[in-house]
Amino acid sequence: MNEGEFILKLQQRAREQERIVRDMPFSKVFSTVSLWLGHHPYRILVPLAFLITLLFRGIFGGSYTDFVLKIFRTI
């Protein structure tokens, strides 16, 4: 395969991928969210971890903290 054929094959695959993304439901939302999360994952993961911790702490009380400490003590 020469360089020209390789470039044509790459362009064809890129067109196929664009068509797949356009045919997806909510394609605009999906592409925006995936690009944003790809560059800034900590903006979601840190607050989410904080909220989950507060939720579990509220449900289980002090035993949740002891459980987490026990997990990290065994590592």
Image (cartoon, helix red, strand yellow):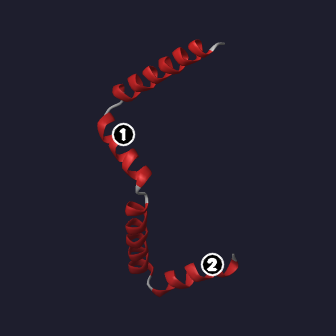
Where does label 2 land, which residue? 72
Give the spatial CA distance, label 1 vs label 2: 37 Å
- For residue 32, which quarter of the picture? top left
- For residue 41, which quarter of the picture? bottom left
Q: Is residue 5 above or below residue 42?
A: above
If you read the primary sequence from the N terminus, does the residue marked by circle 1 or circle 2 appear first? 1
Residue at 43% in and 20% down: 15
Checking the image for residue 15, the label placed there is none
Q: Is residue 61 above or below residue 27?
A: below
Where does label 1 land, which residue? 31
**Can I make out residue 26 in this image?**
no
Query: Number of callouts in the render?
Result: 2
Residue 9 drawn at (x, y percent):
54, 16
Q: Amino acid at mark 2?
A: Phe
**Can I make out residue 57 in this image?**
yes
The mark closer to the camera, 1 or 2, is 1
Residue at 50% in and 80% down: 64
Q: Is residue 29 above or below residue 75?
A: above
